[in-house]
Amino acid sequence: MKGAASALILIFPTIVSAADGSGQEFSFLASLLQMIAALALVVGLILITWHFSGKLMKRLPVGQQLLSKHIRLIETRYLGPKKALLLVEVGGEYLLLSSSDTALTFIKQINMLEDIEVIEESPEQGSFATLLARLRLRHD
């Protein structure tokens, strides 16, 4: 902290002298500080907007409807480009579906719930931070 304060004290006369100039001198340091301040302002505005938009989306009635789904995608396993197996819960029943680039095909209704480990969805499960944490765990 002392280092930052001493650097600011050393830089301040340069900034003042750059502001006093006739406009013909170019101060790299003054331009750098101005660019850093503008970047901090833009990033701060983005973070504030993100924070308040998240709070607003939770209060909307559409968000509440999305939390009480009757159809859930439990798991997706990709077999190749544009080909996947989907495990879907519809009204408490589990269905295995095949998806390709042109069709969605019913394969089987799964009745043995003991063999399937079902992980309940949490509201935060779809967040970017949760997705990033899951990807880190897979690669470790």
Image (spheres, rainbow, N blue to C red):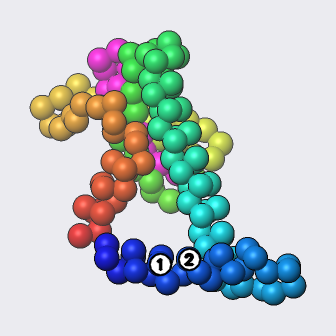
The C terminus sits in image quarter: bottom left
137 left or right, relative to 30:
left
Which mark is drawn over residue 9?
Answer: 1
Where is residue 82 drawn, in percent x and y? 57, 53
Vertical position of residue 72 compared to residue 84: above or below: above
Inspect the magenta stretch and tell me whether residue 60 lies in it. no
Visible in this render: residue 95?
Answer: no
Instruction: State the residue position of label 2.
Output: 12
Vertical position of residue 139 compared to residue 21: above or below: above
Q: Residue at x 56, y 39 (%)?
A: 49
Task: Kindly report the distance in space between the C-alpha atoms of the residues bearing marks 1 and 2.
Answer: 5 Å
Q: Residue at x 78, y 85 (%)?
A: 26
Most extreme residue toward the left is 114
Q: For residue 94, which quarter of the picture?
A: top left
Q: Nearer the viewer, residue 129 or 131?
A: 129
Q: Nearer the viewer, residue 2 or 72?
A: 2
Image label count? 2
Where is residue 127 drawn, in percent x and y? 40, 42
Query: Cβ–Cβ below 8 Å for labels 1 and 2?
Result: yes
Vertical position of residue 99 compared to residue 90: above or below: below
Where is residue 2 drawn, in percent x and y? 31, 76
The secondary element bearing badge 1 is classed as helix
Q: Residue at x 69, y 81 (%)?
A: 17
The span shown in magenta is 83-94
The N terminus sits in image quarter: bottom left
The secondary element bearing badge 2 is classed as helix
Q: Which amino acid is tagged 1?
A: Ile
